């Protein structure tokens, strides 16, 4: 089955700097890769996703890149703000599959 | 609010008791998922419904766990004879066909 690895487990950046979180996956059949942000005591919130027919997708300060050959994808957050502090999860799923397989999460701390 | 709704938000129960959680998905979504999340980990898939049919169950879902989705609307997750190892956040998510999965706020279960 699918296995998703995520790193780093914790990331501290200064406000205004960029943050990059990386994930690798094992199942070549996976072709849908969402990223979720989870704040303390809340459920995961979808922030951006990418499908395998696209190499990069951007939404304001957030971008995701995908390298299907190498089976890895990354989340990039530019101009970080204190409110970006949260736990971020990557996930992978077959396009019409039934379940998401999540990474272990990255705790992002943005210091002001 | 048209998001995924879960009830209760918190549940404390004694070991050996039965508990039931409820999830109300986004109204137009026909797919519903249950996940479990323990501290410091990403969500793990438990089970999946398409309309009222339960189509997939994880090995994590022991015989003490049962989920239903009568009439293809809300869903319930019951845990019988709770154990301390059942303490976790139980997350519900919903999606339409080939669309993004949106999570509820979760039910945090503590077994004492």
Image (cartoon, coloured by chain):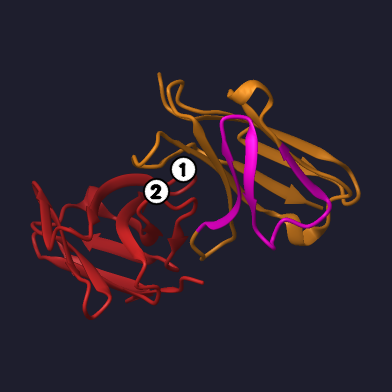
| Residue at 22% from the left image edge and 68% from the top image edge | A74
Residue B99 horizontal side relative to residue B38, left or right: left
Q: In the figure, residue A110 lies in which quadrant?
A: bottom left
**Residue B93, placed above or below residue A67:** above
Q: Give the side of residue A34 with respect to residue A56, left or right.
A: right
Q: Quadrant of residue B49?
A: top right
Q: Nearer the viewer, residue A45 or B101?
A: B101
Q: Quadrant of the N terminus of chain B?
A: top left
Question: Could you say which is closer to the camera, residue B28 or residue B81?
Answer: B28
Which image quarter: residue B10? top right
The residues bearing labels 2 and 1 have C-alpha atoms spaced at a distance of 6 Å
Which residue does the numbered mark 1 point to in the structure image? A42
The local secondary structure at tag 2 comes to: loop
Q: Is residue B28 magenta?
A: no
Where are the magenta residues, as a range? Answer: B43-67
Residue B8 percent across, percent down from the top left: 65, 31
In the figure, the shade used to draw chain A is red
Which chain letter matches label 1? A
Label 2 marks a residue whose chain is A
Are circles 2 and 1 on residues that touch, CB within 8 Å?
yes
Q: Callout 2 environment at 10 Å: few (<14), some (14 to 19), or many (20+)? A: some
């Amino acid at each position: 089955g699918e296995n998703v690895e995520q790193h780093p487990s914790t990331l501290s950046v200064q406000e205004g700097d960029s943050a990059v979180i990386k994930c690798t996956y094992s199942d070549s059949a996976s072709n849908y890769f969402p990223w979720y942000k989870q704040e303390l005591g809340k459920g995961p919130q979808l922030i951006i996703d990418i499908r395998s027919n696209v190499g990069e997708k951007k939404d304001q300060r957030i971008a995701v890149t995908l390298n299907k050959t190498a089976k890895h994808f990354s989340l990039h957050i530019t101009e970080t703000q204190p409110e970006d502090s949260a736990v971020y999860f990557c996930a992978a799923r077959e396009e019409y599959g039934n379940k998401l397989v999540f990474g272990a999460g990255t705790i992002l701390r943005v210091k002001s | 609010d048209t998001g995924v709704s879960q009830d209760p938000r918190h549940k404390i129960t004694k070991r050996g008791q039965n508990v039931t959680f409820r999830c109300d998905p986004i109204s137009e979504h026909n797919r519903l998922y249950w996940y479990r999340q323990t501290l410091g980990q990403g969500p793990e898939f438990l089970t999946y419904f398409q309309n009222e049919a339960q189509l997939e169950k994880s090995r994590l879902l022991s015989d003490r766990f049962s989920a239903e989705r009568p009439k293809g609307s809300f869903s319930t997750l019951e845990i019988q004879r709770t154990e301390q190892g059942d303490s976790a956040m139980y997350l519900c998510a919903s999606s339409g066909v080939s669309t993004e999965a949106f999570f509820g706020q979760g039910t945090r279960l503590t077994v004492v």
